[in-house]
Image (spheres, helix red, strand yellow):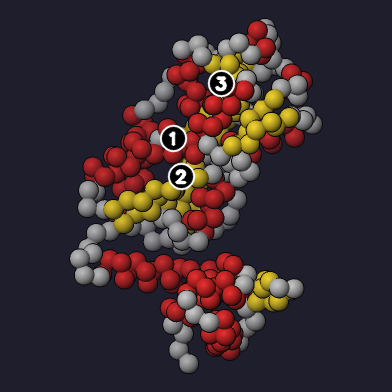
């Protein structure tokens, strides 16, 4: 029996949901058909793909290996169908960005890229670093720029630009009235923090843990705009890239503190899968990213340091 793309797509559906009936609904087929498809795959490759525990299926080590190949195969086939179908002759680049990069860098980079390769369609996804990493691993994105730490050894991360976080609050917050801001002061503040999976949150929480301190998170939000709103409206303390709050600091709307020991320093990185074919579009995108970074190196505002 020959394996087909349909076999692989159904297998991916089961692997991602952990349920036969969920995959059946997704592909508008019966659950017995899904079961038969998985059985045919197991017989063909001579391995057990899933173990059933309770009402959920858990992928085996062999199944995980097949899943990696299946995603790449399905992606290649879908790209073939998309680009070779009648009326479709445009290449496409799927770009990812973590929230800070997506806000302060990606629009300029995509604009530069489109000027260089106007015939290439672009799709850009902005989310936290963890989500972008997961989508790269699932071959849902071709390349990305993130500010958080990449965990998977399957991904290549190339440093692009340095950045650092600042702690910021309203200019009438009690922090702004202090001559010195110390670590113990942070434990008495009400914080607005990005969601789990955010590179910004991860870096700051690592610093807090290393210093055996604790902070009170009053608000948890998924974007910088919401962070800024909670700082201005609820008088919370926020954490963000200096690039995102530079204008408000210089205008006197916000008060900010940096870490002069480099504990809040980080790097924006270009990221792609190690097995990804490096297309002309990807190479051009990397060149455009480097060009934009070189053109727009902002001057850092004068900030008070955490003591």
Whole-percent x, y for residue 270 in the image: 45, 45
Dot 2 or dot 3, earlier in sequence: 2
Extreme left residue here? 87
Q: Secondary structure at mark 3?
A: helix
N-term-proximal mark, 2 vs 1: 1
Residue name at image x 50 percent, y 45 percent: 127
SS at badge 2: strand
Q: Secondary structure at mark 1?
A: helix
Percent across and percent down for residue 147 are 52, 39
Residue 232 — which label? 3
Q: CA distance from mark 2 to mark 3?
A: 24 Å
Vertical order, 229 against 272 (above or below)? above
Q: CA distance from mark 2 to mark 1?
A: 9 Å
Which residue appears at 43% of the width and 78% of the height? Answer: 5
In which quadrant will I find the C terminus? top right
Q: Nearer the viewer, residue 278 or 83?
A: 83
Residue shown at the point (38%, 33%) measured from the top left: 293
> Residue 126 shows which numbered tag?
2
What numbered label is drawn on residue 103? Answer: 1
Q: Nearer the viewer, mark 2 or mark 3?
A: 3
Picture coordinates of residue 58, whole percent (x, y): 67, 71
> Is there any visible trace of residue 259 in the rendered image?
no
**In this rendering, position of residue 59 left or right of residue 79:** right
Is 242 above or below relative to 52?
A: above
Q: Residues under labels 1 and 3: Cα distance?
A: 19 Å
Residues at marks 2 and 1 touching, judged by CB atoms closer than 8 Å: yes
């Amino acid at each position: 029996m020959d394996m087909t793309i349909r076999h692989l797509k159904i297998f991916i559906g089961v692997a991602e949901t952990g349920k036969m009936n969920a995959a059946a609904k997704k592909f508008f087929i019966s659950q017995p058909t899904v079961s038969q498809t998985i059985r045919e795959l197991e017989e063909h490759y001579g391995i057990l793909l899933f173990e059933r525990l309770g009402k959920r299926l858990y992928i085996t080590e062999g199944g995980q290996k097949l899943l990696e190949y299946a995603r790449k195969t399905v992606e290649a086939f879908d790209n073939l169908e998309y680009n070779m179908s009648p009326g479709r002759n445009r290449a496409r680049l799927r770009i990812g960005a973590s929230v800070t990069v997506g806000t302060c860098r990606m629009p300029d980079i995509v604009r530069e890229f489109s000027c260089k390769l106007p015939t290439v369609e672009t799709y850009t996804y902005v989310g936290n670093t963890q989500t972008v990493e997961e989508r790269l691993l699932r071959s849902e994105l071709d390349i990305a720029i993130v500010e958080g730490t990449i965990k998977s050894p399957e991904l290549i991360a190339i440093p692009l630009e340095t950045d650092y976080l600042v702690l910021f609050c309203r200019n009438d917050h009690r922090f702004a009235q202090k001559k010195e801001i110390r670590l113990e002061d942070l434990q008495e503040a009400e914080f607005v923090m990005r969601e789990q999976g955010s590179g910004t949150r991860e870096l700051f929480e690592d610093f807090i843990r290393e210093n055996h301190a604790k902070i009170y998170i009053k608000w948890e939000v998924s974007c910088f705009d919401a962070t800024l709103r909670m700082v201005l409206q609820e008088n919370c303390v926020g954490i963000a890239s200096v690039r995102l709050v530079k204008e408000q600091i210089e205008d006197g709307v916000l008060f900010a503190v940096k870490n002069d020991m480099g504990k809040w320093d980080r790097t924006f990185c270009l990221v792609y899968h190690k097995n990804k074919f490096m297309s002309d579009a990807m190479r051009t995108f990397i060149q455009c990213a480097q060009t934009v970074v070189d053109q727009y190196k902002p001057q850092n505002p004068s900030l008070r340091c955490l003591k």
